[in-house]
């Protein structure tokens, strides 16, 4: 059972480039989330999804877009990367409203 | 935006010491309180979810209590071991229309040395 996986594990981008981060879960969870983790800031919610075909903004959505075309996948896109988007990105999923969230291993992104 | 505060920011103890951390949150805006353990270079791993005032949870040497009326939770580690070294995160699910969105504190970083 793979749980939550993230692709890629590490990426270096130049300012202005675009990329997509993929999150996949095999637990049939309804809810999925994208967080970013920065030193001294804790985990902050970027976007989330309450089910296939739905997305919503979190605390820090600017500069990011998401899609949930399939229940098991949640994609995070950066259309024009900026150095301020250098961070570690974590995906998570859960089945119930107050339930434990299961996290992926993280994607480390460096924008030069 | 919810304010979830954790203290201390970091802690350094000797093997065998018992220790505890605090998570504070707005008592009026509560649905569930989560504790996560986060080892360096790994992903956060859930320890406990608590919802009721007075809840106590235990997992091995780690336990947690919840006071929703005054807005705090304590995490205790009895007889700390080097493998307990990690950052301990507290997170809050607020009550309504939340889709289980978590607001995280910045964590307490624990280092246990021999």
Image: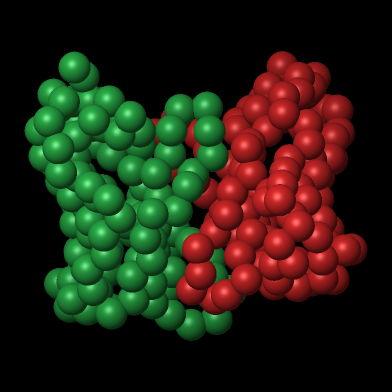
Q: Residue furthest right?
A: A69
Horizontal side of B19 relative to B75 (left or right) equals left
Front in this rendered view, residue A12 or A93 = A93
Q: Position of residue A96 (x, y in %)?
A: 57, 75
Identify the residue at horizontal 78%, vertical 31% (top origin): A8
Q: Position of residue B93 (x, y in %)?
A: 43, 69
| Quadrant of the rendering where the C terminus of chain B is positioned | top left
**Can you say whether A17 is above or below B99 in the image?**
above
Q: Residue furthest left?
A: B17
| Quadrant of the rendering where the N terminus of chain B is positioned | bottom left
Horizontal side of B1 relative to B43 (left or right) equals left
Identify the residue at horizontal 83%, vertical 28% (top origin): A16
The answer to whether residue A46 is visible is no
Horizontal side of B15 relative to A18 (left or right) equals left
Identify the residue at horizontal 30%, vertical 34% (top origin): B84
Give the quadrant of residue B70.
bottom left
Give the quadrant of residue A29.
bottom right
Colouring rule applied to residues: by chain
**Can you say whether A6 is above or below A32 in the image?**
above
Q: Which hue belongs to chain A?
A: red
Q: Position of residue B30 (x, y in %)?
A: 34, 75
Horizontal side of A89 relative to A37 (left or right) equals right
Q: Which hue belongs to chain B?
A: green
Q: Residue furthest bottom?
A: B96
The answer to whether residue B78 is visible is yes
Identify the residue at horizontal 35%, vertical 33% (top origin): B86
Q: Position of residue B44 (x, y in %)?
A: 49, 44
The tally of labels here is: 0
């Amino acid at each position: 059972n793979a749980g939550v996986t993230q692709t890629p594990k590490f990426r270096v981008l130049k300012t202005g480039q675009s990329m997509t981060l993929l999150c996949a879960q095999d637990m049939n969870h309804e809810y999925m989330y994208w967080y970013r983790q920065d030193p001294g800031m804790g985990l902050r919610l970027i976007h989330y999804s309450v089910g296939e075909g739905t997305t919503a903004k979190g605390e820090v959505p600017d500069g990011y877009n998401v899609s949930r075309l399939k229940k098991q996948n949640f994609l995070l896109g950066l259309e024009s990367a900026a150095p301020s988007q250098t961070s570690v990105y974590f995906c998570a999923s859960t089945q119930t409203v107050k339930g434990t969230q299961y996290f992926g291993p993280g994607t480390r992104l460096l924008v030069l | 935006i919810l304010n979830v505060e954790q203290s201390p920011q970091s802690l350094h103890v000797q093997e065998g010491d018992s220790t505890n951390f605090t998570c504070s949150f707005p008592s009026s805006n509560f649905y569930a309180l989560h504790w996560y353990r986060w080892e360096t270079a790994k992903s956060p791993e859930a320890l406990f979810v608590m919802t009721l005032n007075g809840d106590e949870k235990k997992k091995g040497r780690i336990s947690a209590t919840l006071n929703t009326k005054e807005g705090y939770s304590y995490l205790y580690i009895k007889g700390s071991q080097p493998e307990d070294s990690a950052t301990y995160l507290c997170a809050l699910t607020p009550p309504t229309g939340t889709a289980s969105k978590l607001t995280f504190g910045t964590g307490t970083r624990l280092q246990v040395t021999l």
